[in-house]
Amino acid sequence: MAGLRLFRQEYAVQSGAESVVVLDFETTGLSPDNGDRAIEIGAVRLQNGIITERFQQLMDPGRRISPFIEDYTGITNAMLADAAPVSTVMADFADFIGDDNLVAHNASFDKRFLDAELARISRSYPGAFACSLLVSRRLYQDSPDHKLGTLVRWKNIAGEGNFHRALYDAEMTAYLWLAMLEDIREQSRLSDVPFDLVTQLSKTAKKSVGSFFSRW
DNA sequence: TGCCAGGCCCTCTTTAGGGCCTT
């Protein structure tokens, strides 16, 4: 039943019956609970298997970012000095999300920052969150590791840009997501029993992915 | 100067610990 539901939902993605927003944050650190803030949001909207919209904004976190983050992301304090406040950008991004479901690589990280920044401006989103990292760990067990960059290279996904910039990471995650949906569909086609990703996930991951697909 | 978190998941497990992944 779950497998059939999943297969139907994959079809919904391929047919463009629904759309999904794939997003990525660059931040001042790892934890909003420790005062870290978002400094860049990048996102793409997938419809009918193609990217139909893009969103990218730098945002001023209200304090200087560390040399490590400057080096890691390529985003400098000078670049952020002219950026709009986080609250302004996040309000625009909440509008961009609309009612869509969301996808991110290691979604628990991006969800924490999205929830924290939207809570600051009393905004929210109705969609469910799916994690390409959790799916890849089940689907691509032969991959050297499950970092986004490794998976993109391992799947021979073409791209020209810099990892650790929000829009490029969001685009690469989107193409990885489409590749995974195609591979799930192919495994279902080759097997008498449809490949049932949902039942292969752990209880906690199942809860997340299951709620995501149930909205399709 | 060095460190800071949280969720998932495997295993030498479940009354726990540690690696992976994100910035």
Image (cartoon, coloured by chain):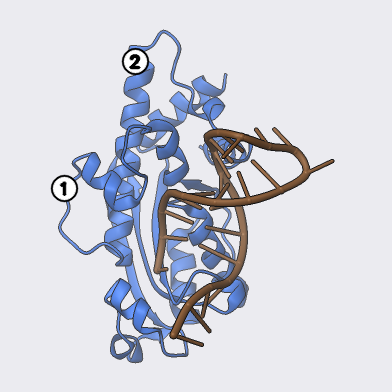
Chain colours: A blue, B brown
Q: Horizontal placement of A144 versus A88: left or right?
A: left
**On the image, numbered disc 2 is attached to which residue?**
A189
- Relative image position of residue A16 (x, y in whole percent): 35, 38
Q: Residue at x 17, y 53 (%)?
A: A159
Q: Earlier in the sequence, mark 1 or mark 2?
A: 1
- Relative image position of residue A25 (x, y in whole percent): 41, 66
Label count reads 2
Looking at the image, do the residues carrying marks 1 and 2 touch, with CB atoms under 8 Å apart? no
Q: Mark 1 against mark 2, which lies toward the viewer?
A: 1
Q: Horizontal placement of A162 versus A38: left or right?
A: left
Front residue of A94/B6: it is B6
**On the image, numbered disc 1 is attached to which residue?**
A158
Looking at the rendered structure, the secondary structure element under dot 2 is: helix
The chain identifier of the residue carrying mark 1 reads: A
Amino acid carrying label 2: it is Arg
Picture quarter containing residue A40? bottom left
Amino acid carrying label 1: it is Ala
Q: Residue at x 52, y 67 (%)?
A: A113
Q: Residue at x 49, y 23 (%)?
A: A196
The chain identifier of the residue carrying mark 2 reads: A
Picture quarter containing residue A144? top left
Q: Is residue A91 above or below residue B14?
A: below
